[in-house]
Amino acid sequence: MSKMPGAPQIRTCRVAFVVYDDVTLLDVSGPLEVFHQANREGPRYETVLVSPKGGNVRTSSGLTLADTVTAAEVDRVDTVLIAGADHLAERVPDDVRDTAAVLVARAERVASVCTGAFVLAALGALDGRRATTHWRHASALARQYPQIQVEPDALHITDGRYVTSAGISAGIDLTLALVEADHGADVAREVARELVVFMQRPGGQSQFSTAIATPPAKSDPLRVATAAVVADPAGDHSLPNLAKQVAVSPRHLTRLFQTELRTTPGRWIERVRLDRAQQLILDGHSITAAAQHSGLGSDETLRRAFARHLSTTPTEYRRRFQQVGQ
């Protein structure tokens, strides 16, 4: 689309969504809305829903996707996006695989959300590549397709023309990354702001923070202690002070951490603070500010934590993930 006479025409990207009965609705609607919002300043994307038989498709939530078309009816496709469903982890239906195969063969870029990666795996498209999927199905993907390098903790991964993402809401992160790759970070940021979603969840970032990944504490003292740390990572959480807050001895609190969380208080607190430091860096804070405000204290302590848990440096992390995409 041109904004003035003589300006070059911007070719819209044709995105074909592969859908089918029992598809996960948010795997489709989330990315669709990202593309829709990206068109607010002009027609950047044209989307079409493609199913094995065309017509209406019933999603797993019971809502219907109307007026889908067959692959034979799609005359042009630039990007294919394969939505997921729980049953794909057990078996990919032949008609879903065949529909995807037709589109994938013609597309410049291929993406999958959640267990949509199993469709690409069934086609052999991910052989020798890095890929991810929903954490609950990652082990099944690795077991069924050992030739794929499955990374179970990533939000989304780009390897060549293939982009795979984790489950459900991660499809929004993936699609924001596609928009950024096509039109730049400013456009992707405006879309994220319009959708009121977190802009910078980079692909290599963990699907879970330490707080989310930690199982619920069974004992009241441990539950109160962990909640206090998550609420204020930079606070004074020395073992004596933390034990005093929950009215137990330092030895007993250490025993609770070991018994329930299989770690020490110090190691768990360091991971929570590292999560906070990562977010501060992504939000644009300096390395020094991230160290101070996360509770890690110094640049050197932050550097050691990054090396120990993430095998990288804070500077490299900021450089790699300063935009949405990888």
Image (cartoon, rainbow, N blue to C red):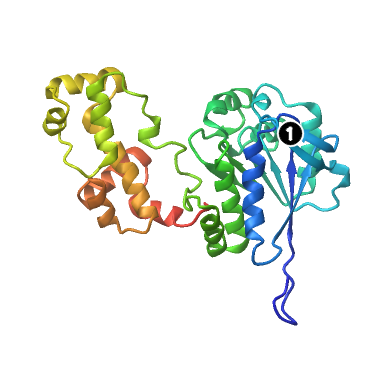
Mark 1 lies on residue = 123
Foreground of the two, 72 or 19: 19
Foreground of the two, 303 or 191: 191
Residue at (13% x, 21% y) in the render? 251
Residue at (81% x, 30% y) in the render? 95
Rendered location of residue 181, percent (x, y): 59, 58
Query: Which quarter of the picture shows residue 91?
Result: top right
Counting other residues with Cα less than 10 Å from the Cα at mark 1, is it few (<14), some (14-19), or many (20 or more)? Answer: some
Rendered location of residue 175, percent (x, y): 60, 49
Task: Please tell me whether mark 1 sits on a helix, a strand or a loop.
Answer: loop
Residue at (35% x, 55% y) in the render? 315
**Above or below 163: residue 119:** above
For the N terminus, the image quarter is bottom right
Residue 161 visible? The answer is: no
Kind of residue sitting beneath label 1: Leu
Q: Residue furthest right?
A: 72
Residue 33 visible? The answer is: yes
**Above or below 140: residue 313:** below
Q: Is residue 167 left or right of residue 12?
A: left
**Above or below 32: residue 270:** above
Q: Is residue 239 left or right of residue 318?
A: left
Rendered location of residue 250, percent (x, y): 13, 24
